[in-house]
Amino acid sequence: PSSFVIIGAGQAGIKAAETLRAKGFDGTITLIGAEHWHPYQRPPLSKAYLKGEMSEDRLLLKAPDWIKGAGIDTHLGKRATRLDPATRTITLDDGTEVPYDKVLIATGTHARWLHLDSADLPGVETLRGIDDTRRIGARLKQAHNVAIIGGGFIGMEVASAVRTMGKTVSVVEAQERILARVVAPEVSAYLETLHSEHGVNLRTAVGVDAIVGNGHVQSVELSDGSAVDADIVLIAAGAEPTIDLAFHAGLDLARGIIVDNACRTSVPHIYAAGDCTVFHSARYGRLIGLESVQNACDQAKAAAASMLGEPVAYDPVPWFWSDQYDTKLQIAGLSAGYDRIETVGSIPEGRFSIRYYAGGTLLAVDSINDPRAHMMARREIAAQPPALAA
Ligand code: FAD
């Protein structure tokens, strides 16, 4: 029987391992994870887990006993440092060499760092893993003022979580509005009002000049000459695919590892899935990269099928969610390139959908507090013919 290796023990990695076993693969599965944790879900890290409302057990995607029982060998707390397609060998940071017949790269993303003055002070954080949330949580016990750089999903979710904990929160966003890259102005405006009503100091259209402190962080200086106090600064400036292994192994790359619709990379026997990939979407007519649980799980399943020689074409309707206070935002599809929107429901009542069109084609639907509209939108978009952007 063959030996399959999975690099990255996150959402995609464990889903691929699980799928391989569910499909009857009886060879060796080796799961390599840089973190010392068993595979866990990240969404609660900026939501319930940050607020202390969820235990670590519940973050785990599979119980350690299940993983063992399924005959999945793990190397946790070990980073793969080299992938050699010529000898089909992976080298770990402790020198261990792991041979493979087929390998899946599921290394995800890492938080983008901003090289600001004094960014190395204690109290300047990013948020990607359990250890980050734990460190931030420990600091929150003493901290009063939290400054968040970046008004994206993670920034706004953390703002809502720490506001709920009674902290003073400032969010600094260089764009004119929060979540500008992903939602229509109407949705940004709705969420900006929500955050302002909850007492968040929202500073849009302003950059960050420097972080200031003495032994620990004290404030953040903004490009308009003002400053916000901070005992904790969260840099929430987006994520970058973790593709160093893939680069040195000679794989074709764009923003992430380029895979086909069966999760094959440009090098034989090497597959990739999850946040670290980009792929050509027939549905949207362009190369896309998705950072979502949906994509990590669905691509992992497609990769597993492909590794077993049973490829299925992967071209999903992407979907995503974000929880802020008691508000649930759900996104179906990708809205980039829309030329018209339609609002359904009531913005003042806080239950509405924004439907994005290009010509007569529905590209995406953002729903606020309307799970039913979200589910219907996913079906509606899926039912349309592909190549929307063509
Ligand atoms: P990951 O889950 O990141 O796993 C990759 C793993 O690979 C990591 O453990 C990493 O340490 C490991 N690794 C990297 N390099 C190596 C190496 N060389 N050797 C060994 N191991 C390596 N998505 C949603 O859909 N909804 C949400 O509400 C949502 N909220 C989120 C909140 C936060 C705070 C974060 C951080 C993410 C959130 N996401 C959300 C995104 C979602 O968690 C990711 O899309 C998903 O985890 C991607 O899965 P993945 O397996 O590709 O990567």
Image (cartoon, grey):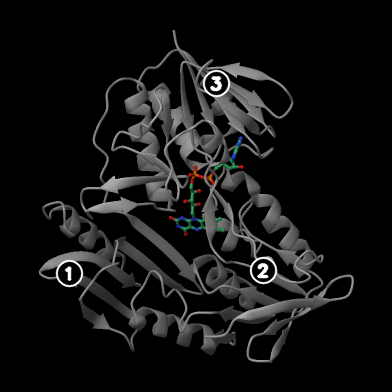
Q: Position of residue 11 (x, y in %)?
A: 49, 42
Q: Mark 1 touching mark 2, by CB under 8 A?
A: no
* Residue appearing at x 52%, y 83% in the figure: 195
The numbered mark, 1 or 2, whose residue comes first in the sequence reads 2
Estimate the spatial distance between the alpha carbons at disc 3 and disc 2, rounded to whole Å.
Answer: 39 Å
Judge by depth and name the residue closer to the eye, 14 or 117. 117
Estimate the spatial distance between the alpha carbons at disc 1 and disc 2, rounded to whole Å.
Answer: 36 Å
Q: Quadrant of the N terminus?
A: top left
| 241, above or below 244, in the image | below
Q: Which residue is mark 2?
A: 234
Q: Amino acid at mark 2?
A: Leu
Dot 3 alpha-carbon crowd within 10 angstroms: few under 14, some 14 to 19, many 20 or more: few
Please give left or right for residue 334 compared with residue 357 in the image: right
Q: Is mark 2 within 8 Å of ligand 1?
A: no
Please give left or right for residue 88 compared with residue 222 in the image: left
Q: Which residue is mark 1?
A: 358
Q: Which residue is mark 3?
A: 69
* Residue appearing at x 38%, y 59% in the figure: 320
Q: Amino acid at mark 1?
A: Ala
The secondary structure type at the circle numbered 3 is: helix
| 218, above or below 310, in the image | below
Q: Amino acid at mark 3?
A: Gly
Q: Position of residue 283 (x, y in %)?
A: 20, 52
Q: Position of residue 345 (x, y in %)?
A: 24, 81
